[in-house]
Image: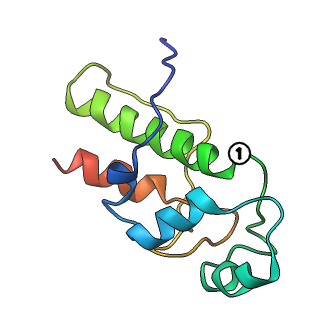
Amino acid sequence: MTCVEPQKATKQEMAAFHTDEYISFLESVTTKPIASDAAKLYMHNVFEDCPVFPGLYDFCRSSAGSSIGGAVALNCRDSVIAINWSGGLHHAMRSAASGFCYVNDIVLAILELLK
């Protein structure tokens, strides 16, 4: 078994499924949302079971990048099995978080596998 440190997903890679507006929102959200951000937080379902936390955007990039990287390794036949222990965040929608999932790394990996 080989452990690989993945690259973080780029905005362009995440935009293969997610809207540009949602990705920009994730990048800009802070741990201290102000009242004017309430509408955007609600619109993107970032509250209750999808809270804002320090490093949220980097977490999203790491999780997505890990799954995309695994798919690339499979496509290139560098590996016959690829596991992303931080992945499987399949509840995220195109422009909203859901069920503790902010970025849908599963869809992003599938899109990579279809190449």
Relative to 49, 9 lies left or right? left
Tell me the quarter of the picture where residue 42 sits: bottom right
Give neighbour class at mark 1: few <14, some 14-19, many 20+ (Cα, 10 Å): few
Q: Is residue 85 above or below residue 22?
A: above
Please tell me whether mark 1 sits on a helix, a strand or a loop: loop
Q: Is residue 3 above or below residue 85?
A: above
Q: Residue at x 36, y 48 (%)?
A: 109
Compare residues 34 and 110 and report the one nearer the observer. Answer: 34
Return the residue at label 1.
Answer: 55
**Residue 31: horizontal and vertical position, in percent?**
80, 59
Compare residues 1 and 97 and report the one nearer the observer. Answer: 97
What color scheme is it?
rainbow
Q: Residue at x 35, y 64 (%)?
A: 17
**Residue 43: horizontal and vertical position, in percent?**
61, 85
Relative to 81, 98 lies left or right? right
Q: Residue at x 30, y 59 (%)?
A: 16
**Residue 55: horizontal and vertical position, in percent?**
71, 45
Q: Residue at x 70, y 63 (%)?
A: 100
Relative to 4, 12 lies left or right? left
